[in-house]
Image: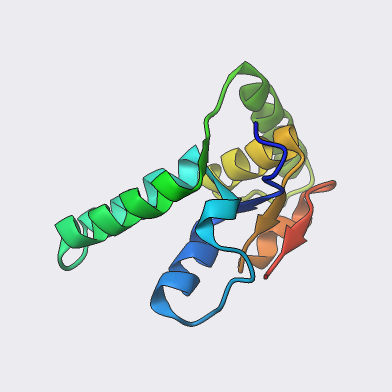
Amino acid sequence: MSGDIRFAVDTSFVIGVLKGTIESARPFSEVAFPFAVIGELRFGAMGGRDPQRKLAEIDEMVRRGMTLAGDGETARMYADLRLRLKSVGTPLPENDIWIAAVCLQHGLTLLTLDRHFDRIDGLALATQ
């Protein structure tokens, strides 16, 4: 992974930037896109208006950044996180656990608007 990348984005953050409801201090070329975020963005685009235009916009945005793929270590972290969250009665959506796991694995700060990520010990969060 590139030493220049210190941040990853969550779906809520990307949508906020695309809709113009928030401004990012970092261009998309300086962030990583967890694989689950790309899937969520593409799913949303495919079910909305003008899916081809939106998919092209997503593809270009992701192309400028870096993709974080999952691997065996990500899966181990995901399972540990999911079990910890379940055991204390504070589950998160499946994709958000994958997003957190890949961020923890690579030591990245997650740019998000979703407050429930606060439940994950050790996950650095930011809104800008």
Q: Residue furthest bottom?
A: 21
At horizontal 25% and vertical 61% (from top left) the residue drawn is 54
- Residue 115, given in percent of the width and then of the height, sits at 68, 66
**Quarter of the image where the N terminus is located:** top right
At horizontal 55% and vertical 27% (from top left) the residue drawn is 70
- For residue 119, side relative to residue 74 (left or right): right
- For residue 96, side relative to residue 54 (left or right): right
From this view, report whether residue 105 is shown above or below residue 40: above
From this view, report whether residue 54 is shown above or below residue 122: below
- Residue 52, given in percent of the width and then of the height, sits at 16, 56
- Residue 81, given in percent of the width and then of the height, sits at 72, 36
Residue 100: image quadrant is top right
- Residue 40, given in percent of the width and then of the height, sits at 40, 50
Residue 55: image quadrant is bottom left
At horizontal 45% and vertical 49% (from top left) the residue drawn is 64
At horizontal 67% and vertical 70% (from top left) the residue drawn is 128
